[in-house]
Image: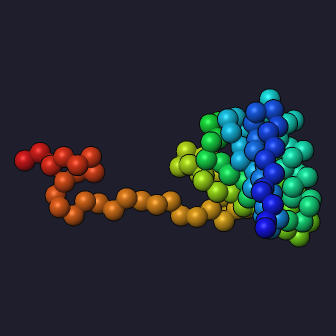
Amino acid sequence: MAAEPELLQVNSWIELSDGGTTTVIGIDGELDALARPAIEPVVLRAVASGTPVVIDLAALSFCDSTGLSLLVAAHQRAAAAGTSLALRNVSPRFRRLFEITEIDTLFALPPLEVAAPPTDGATRDGESPPR
């Protein structure tokens, strides 16, 4: 029987789940100068372990240059440790930030899912277009 992943709450900002093969770090709230001292040691310890690490940004609400530099530092540490670091659940808003700062070149971000245009003449909100 596999052990349940350990969940650890650090300063109400981060959730760490280690299932043995991949460490998932979920950042909830802001990734800025105030949060970095709580988040950085957890992220850097995870990448130093040599296990693949995924940072889940689904609940991220804000990221400034301090947060961006943390992601760059974590990527560099992961490369030095010979392990992978990936981002998941990157919202369009943060994807744009990563593109502008070229951090998207460090991480293989999956393509955004774009809704296909309606084929029945209806608009995306379900209403018929004006005639």
Position of the N terminus by quadrant: bottom right
Q: Which of 93/9 is in front? A: 9
Please give the name of the residue rendered at 62% of the width and 42% of the height, measured from the top-left corner. Answer: 59
On screen, residue 14 above or below 45: above
Q: Which of 35/19 is in front? A: 19
Please give the name of the residue rendered at 78% of the width and 56% of the height, measured from the top-left corner. Answer: 5
Note whether residue 84 is visible. Answer: no
On screen, residue 92 above or below 81: above
On screen, residue 25 above or below 63: below
Q: Is residue 61 left or right of residue 40?
A: left
Residue placed farthest to the top in the image?
A: 34
Please give the name of the residue rendered at 60% of the width and 52% of the height, measured from the top-left corner. Answer: 90
Quarter residue 50 falls in:
bottom right
Residue placed farthest to the left in the image?
A: 131
Note whether residue 81 is visible. Answer: yes
Q: Give the percent coordinates (x, y) of residue 27.
A: 71, 43
Task: Give the colour scheme of this rendering.
Answer: rainbow
Q: Give the percent coordinates (x, y) of residue 121.
A: 16, 58
Please give the name of the residue rendered at 87% of the width and 55% of the height, measured from the top-left corner. Answer: 46
Residue placed farthest to the front in the image?
A: 1
On screen, residue 12 above or below 19: above
Count all numbered tags in the image, as a single digit: 0
Q: Give the percent coordinates (x, y) of residue 11.
A: 81, 32
Q: Give the percent coordinates (x, y) of residue 16.
A: 79, 49
